[in-house]
């Protein structure tokens, strides 16, 4: 039995501690905001925060987050994070499947770099694939959120 | 052919809309679905209802995969009806032929349903006005529906839609010929930029995709398929798999019977109580296969065969003048071989489906572009009647054509029937790439003869590719008229002598539609070759292209004996060179063609292509570093897609098309070795990431009253040739094979 902290709430888990956090969140807890895209840390669809920093939940076993704060999109904000507002203002999503991971990654970036340059954005966001091709708007939305926040 | 029918008796609508609701339906028979529906018994179809609290329910019968159909098709109805969008609730339709075509493919949601939605909206509006007139005992001409209420102009009296719904439901549905439509200037939503219906759910992680579907008592399945198409299962050992915690059992799925069509591939499924356990169990399976005849398929050899075929005469599919005479008279001859490999769709959401088979019925929850095909496929797979297949359509995490093919739904249904409980089949990314319906590989041969002045006096083009028809029939070797009509038999150039030929090719993998389909390789060859000719003639590529397109005219392909399906009625959607010229001129002007000062190593390339009845011209700015690294600082696209519902969503589709086009041009390649696909995940089937994507894509939409045309796909085809033409301008190196990652630029 291990104890995890997801979006501020403690949770007990007696399953296989090697299970990736992504599948624990999705299939066991029922938090399906984080998505499965590749299972190899290559696409970013599964991005969540561990103590406020973006990680790929598909390659992080649950035992690895014991004693840490895990935040998913469901716990990112009470209402709307500035990034979610910016995303909506600029109509970023197409299919939307990658967007949770994009927002979680961007939230981690803004926490560390409140005023990111294009280069900072490239460096932070390159691990997040959007097959629909919304990159231009993602970039603009990150800049917008950074501006609004300041 | 469309008629309107009163259909308030439909029981499922009573459920959805509640008693006393005004329900309108339309019989829909878009041309595309005609053949399929001719023999069908038509039940009235329903698209709109009003609840007594005034909520307007509109049925979205198209699938949402990022193109915004689920919002924009209902929005047309809401606008015509004068509904307040804030009080509209969208209901996603299950698969049902009563809605007409639901295959969200071929960029035709708005095109095929614009007028249907308008008719439904106008009927509702006019019945509500009539109901109010009756209640007030005034002439209906004094009653006007305005934003969710009917107003009596002389007195200023008002009644809300909710208050009028019950009375309106008792009125006869007006004849279509009596309907009065809003003028364009009266549109409230069309032409404006409304956000998509699911926007906030998406940004908050609440939107439900196929991957998120869950039903009580559901188990999870991961399926091991034959690595080679058509391989036979010899034996399997599941001892170790069954020891994985969470794994309950394994199930054999019988192999498909050729032709494979949309059938389940067959294989061994590992069943578990969560996705990860199913994946883990599957890794422990020991399966042996007889790979069968497709083990002969190796891409490097196949490529040579295709190219050899393209070098030989093929079946003539278009012939104008006499190319041989033209070549004899030419002063300069150019020849070029082009090649585009297989591509995988690689939508961000791998294919996935939930099926629940019980009491002779099968209910599915699936991210599908084509819920009626799910019905047909599942019905055949589990031996029930199609009407007992209920297909709920979730949001799709991308589709690009892959999710029109419901083999994965059949897998879930077969397993659920066998296990007697709901089953969720989840494909890994590796499955998604290994067992795709690939975009076809193609080889093209181009030959042109120029006269003294550089004008083309003869143009021969040959296209060789395994056909999508091989999915549905055995021994298919030739391209279909549909595939050839995608940028090959409809080349809109003014050429005195022109011949197009198609050579034979045998298929060894599953082939299917991928965003813009055969236009990809045809536009790549034709638009690149146009640029080659311009340079050979020593002329500006944009000016040369305009000369090639020639004077404004309607190209009469039928008169040239071409079997050309077009994608809509040719009278409504002719091949109009004036429109193609216009987008070329527009994009040249906006991109600063010939005028913009560019940094060293940067250059522009241009390409223009008509597909899905839309006219697109693209200018790509490329930057090639001294080390030969490519980046794309800017893309300009001019778009004439006829009438537009949402300019912002059109722009987003073209921004996306630039990225999709960049992926296929820069790095997209699926290959096979001994019948097995070599790629497996984003490490070896990369797609464009943020740092590789065009930094900025600017989209210019031509104002048009022409009938609505395609938007989701037509941005893709001109991208690769525009990029490669830019690379030629920057480096002098002509790219005739994709992807660019295989080419050395310095
Ligand atoms: S699913 Fe985790 S990075 Fe792709
Ligand atoms: S919006 Fe579809 S993958 Fe990003």
Image (cartoon, coloured by chain):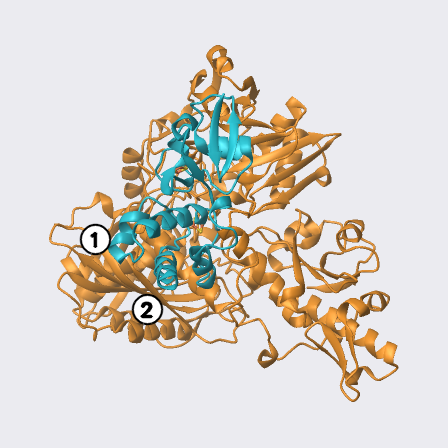
Chain colours: A cyan, B orange
Q: Mark 1 = which residue?
A: B630
| Residue at position x 28%, y 41% in the image | B308
Say left or right for B514 vs B69. Answer: left
Q: Secondary structure at mark 2?
A: loop
Q: Tell me the distance, in whole angstroms, between the alpha carbons under discs 2 and 1.
A: 38 Å
Q: Which mark is residue B496?
A: 2
Q: Kindly tell me whether residue B691 is visible in this rendering.
A: no
Choose top left, top right, bottom left or bottom right for residue B546. Answer: bottom left
| Mark 2: few/some/many CA within 10 Å (<14, 14-19, 20+) | some
User: Residue B488, image x and y in percent?
Assistant: 39, 57
Work out whether disc 2 and disc 1 sit on a shared chain.
Answer: yes
Depth order, front residue of A106/B191: A106
Q: Quadrant of residue B185?
A: bottom right
Residue B247 sits above or below residue A92 on the image:
above
> x, y percentage for residue B598?
17, 68
Let me know if residue B744 appears in the view.
yes
Secondary structure beneath disc 1? strand
Point out the tag, 2 or 1, that comes first from the N-terminus: 2
Residue B711, x across and y down, in percent: 47, 61
Q: Are marks 2 and 1 in contact (CB under 8 Å)?
A: no
Give the residue at the far bottom of this rendering.
B154
Q: Nearer the viewer, residue B521 or A20?
A: A20
The residue lying toward the viewer, choosing from B81 and B179, is B81
| Label 1 crowd bin: few (<14), some (14–19), many (20+), radius 10 Å | many
What chain does badge 1 belong to?
Answer: B
**Residue at 49% across / 69% down in the picture?**
B574
Q: Quadrant of the N terminus of chain B?
A: bottom right
């Amino acid at each position: 039995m291990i104890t995890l902290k997801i979006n501020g709430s403690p949770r007990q888990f007696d399953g296989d501690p090697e299970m990736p956090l992504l599948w624990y969140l999705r299939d066991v807890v029922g938090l399906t905001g984080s998505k499965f895209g590749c299972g190899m840390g290559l696409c970013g669809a599964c991005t969540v925060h561990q103590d406020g920093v973006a990680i790929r939940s598909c390659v992080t076993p649950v035992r690895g987050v014991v004693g840490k704060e895990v935040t998913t999109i469901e716990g990112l904000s009470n209402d709307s994070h500035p990034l979610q507002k910016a995303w909506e203002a600029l109509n970023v999503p197409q299919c939307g499947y990658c967007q949770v991971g994009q927002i979680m990654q961007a939230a981690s970036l803004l926490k560390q770099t409140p005023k990111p340059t294009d280069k900072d954005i490239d460096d932070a966001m390159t691990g997040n694939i959007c097959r629909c091709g919304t990159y231009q708007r993602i970039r603009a939305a990150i800049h917008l959120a950074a501006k609004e926040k300041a | 052919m469309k008629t309107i029918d009163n259909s308030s008796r439909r029981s499922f609508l009573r459920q959805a809309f509640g008693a006393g609701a005004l329900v309108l339906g339309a019989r829909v028979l878009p041309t595309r679905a005609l053949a399929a529906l001719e023999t069908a018994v038509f039940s009235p179809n329903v698209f709109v209802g009003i609840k007594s609290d005034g909520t307007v329910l509109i049925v979205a019968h198209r699938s949402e995969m990022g193109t915004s159909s689920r919002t924009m098709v209902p929005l047309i109805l809401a606008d015509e009806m004068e509904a307040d969008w804030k009080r509209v609730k969208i209901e996603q339709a299950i698969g049902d032929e009563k809605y007409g075509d639901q295959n969200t493919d071929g960029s035709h949601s708005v095109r095929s349903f614009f007028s249907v939605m308008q008719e439904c909206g106008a009927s509702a509006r006019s019945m509500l006005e009539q109901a109010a007139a009756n209640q007030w005992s005034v002439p209906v001409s004094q009653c006007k529906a305005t934003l969710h209420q009917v107003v009596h102009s002389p007195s200023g009296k008002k009644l809300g839609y909710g208050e009028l719904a019950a009375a309106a439901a008792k009125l006869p549905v007006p004849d279509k010929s009596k309907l009065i439509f809003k003028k364009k200037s009266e549109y409230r939503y069309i032409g404006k930029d409304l956000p998509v219906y699911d926007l906030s759910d998406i940004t908050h992680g609440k939107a439900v995709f196929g991957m998120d579907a869950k039903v009580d008592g559901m188990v999870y399945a991961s399926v091991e398929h034959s690595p080679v198409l058509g391989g036979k299962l010899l034996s399997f050992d599941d001892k170790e798999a069954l020891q994985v915690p969470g794994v309950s059992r394994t199930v054999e799925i019988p192999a498909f019977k050729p032709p494979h069509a949309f059938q389940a591939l067959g294989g061994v499924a590992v069943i578990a109580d969560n996705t990860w356990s199913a994946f883990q169990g599957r890794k422990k399976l020991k399966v042996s296969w007889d790979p069968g005849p497709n083990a002969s398929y190796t891409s490097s050899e196949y490529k040579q065969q295709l190219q050899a075929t393209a070098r030989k005469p093929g079946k003539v599919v278009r012939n104008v003048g006499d190319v041989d005479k033209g070549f004899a008279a030419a002063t300069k001859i150019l020849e070029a071989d082009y090649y585009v490999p297989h591509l995988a769709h690689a939508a961000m959401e791998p294919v996935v489906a939930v099926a629940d088979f019980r009491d002779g019925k099968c209910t599915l929850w699936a991210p599908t572009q084509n819920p009626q095909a799910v019905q047909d496929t599942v019905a055949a797979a589990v031996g029930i009647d199609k009407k007992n297949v209920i297909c709920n359509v979730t949001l799709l995490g991308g589709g690009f054509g892959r999710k029109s093919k419901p083999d994965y739904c059949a897998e879930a249904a077969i397993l659920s029937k066998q296990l007697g409980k709901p089953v969720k089949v989840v494909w890994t990314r590796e499955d998604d790439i290994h067992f795709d319906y690939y975009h076809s590989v193609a080889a093209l041969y181009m030959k042109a003869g120029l006269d003294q002045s550089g004008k083309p006096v003869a143009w021969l083009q040959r296209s060789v590719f395994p056909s999508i028809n091989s999915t549905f029939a055995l021994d298919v070797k030739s391209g279909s008229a549909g595939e050839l009509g995608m940028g090959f038999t409809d080349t809109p150039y003014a050429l005195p002598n022109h011949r197009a030929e198609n050579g034979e090719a045998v298929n060894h993998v599953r082939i299917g539609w991928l965003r813009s389909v055969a236009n990809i390789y045809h536009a790549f060859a034709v638009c690149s070759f146009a640029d080659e000719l311009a340079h050979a003639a020593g002329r500006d590529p944009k000016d040369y292209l305009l000369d090639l397109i020639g004077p404004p005219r309607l190209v009469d392909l039928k008169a040239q004996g071409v079997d050309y399906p077009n994608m809509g009625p040719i009278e409504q959607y002719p091949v109009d060179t004036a429109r193609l010229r216009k987008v070329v001129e527009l994009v040249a002007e906006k991109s600063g063609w010939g005028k913009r000062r560019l940094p060293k190593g940067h250059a522009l390339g241009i390409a223009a292509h008509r597909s899905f009845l839309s006219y697109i011209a693209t200018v790509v700015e490329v930057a090639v570093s001294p080390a030969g690294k490519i980046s794309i600082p800017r893309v300009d696209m001019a778009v004439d897609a006829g009438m537009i519902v949402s300019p912002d969503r059109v722009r987003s589709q073209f921004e996306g098309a630039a990225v999709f086009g960049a992926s296929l041009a820069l790095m997209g390649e699926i290959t096979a070795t001994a019948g097995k696909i070599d790629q497996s995940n984003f490490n070896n089937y990369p797609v464009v990431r943020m740092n590789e994507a065009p930094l900025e894509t600017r989209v210019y939409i031509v104002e048009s009253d022409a009938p609505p045309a395609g938007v989701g796909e037509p941005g893709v085809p001109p991208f690769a040739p525009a990029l490669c033409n830019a690379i030629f301008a920057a480096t002098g190196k002509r790219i005739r094979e994709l992807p660019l990652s295989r080419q050395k630029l310095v």
